[in-house]
Image (cartoon, rainbow, N blue to C red):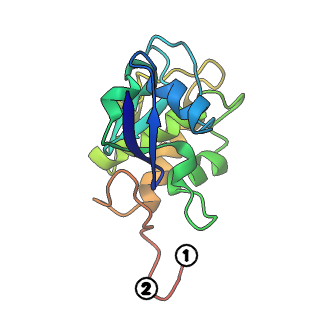
Amino acid sequence: MRITVTVDGTQYSDEVEPRTLLVHYLRETLGKVGTVIGCDTSNCGACTVHLNGQSVKSCSVLAVQADGCEITTVEGLVRDGQLHPVQQAFHDNHALQCGFCTPGMIMQSIDLLADNPDPDEKAVREGLEGNLCRCTGYQNIVRAVRDAARHMSPGAGPEAEQLRETSAIGGE
């Protein structure tokens, strides 16, 4: 079956078997290996991507279901060599250890912040409860999400690139 999708701003049209999972299409056909395969049962969230602006676990979506959709992967968040504010916050707050869950955590965190631009610790933990980390204990992940919230513009949307401190003349 032929599908056409826009992934990280680039349109692709490919033949896929109807049973191909979106995570396998992204990794094996498009080379988007930042989207990792964790459990293949939608329990861990490592494969989280944005489908038309909403986070989904790509191991629970067939590629044919994404036909005509816009998909953003963790690789698609970088703009002009600059990390997305959530990616930067994860780096600055050491919100990873092995890094396996990090792409999915980042994608889910962006979705969380789009819905709640100023979450408290409890809201962050609830917003990320479908994404598992086996290494960190979540303390630095929660800290990173709250730090990113302080740097992102309210209402800027799931792929928000604007920073609160950024002015029209290029301030930080």
- Residue 168 is tagged as 2
Relative to 116, residue 55 above or below: above
Residue that numbered label 1 is attached to = 172
Relative to 160, residue 169 above or below: below
Residue type, numbered disc 1? Glu
* Residue shown at the point (71%, 30%) measured from the top left: 97
Where disc 2 sits, the SS reads loop
Residue 24 percent coordinates (x, y): 53, 24
Relative to 149, residue 32 above or below: above
Residue 61 percent coordinates (x, y): 37, 23
* Residue shown at the point (61%, 63%) measured from the top left: 82
Question: Looking at the image, which is closer to me, 58 or 136?
Answer: 58
Question: Looking at the image, which is closer to me, 17 or 123?
Answer: 17
Question: Looking at the image, which is closer to me, 36 or 167?
Answer: 36
Q: Quadrant of residue 68?
A: top left
Structural crowding at the residue carrying mark 1, measured as other residues with C-alpha within 10 Å and reported as few (<14), some (14–19) or many (≥20) = few
User: Can residue 48 be seen in the rendering of this structure?
Assistant: yes
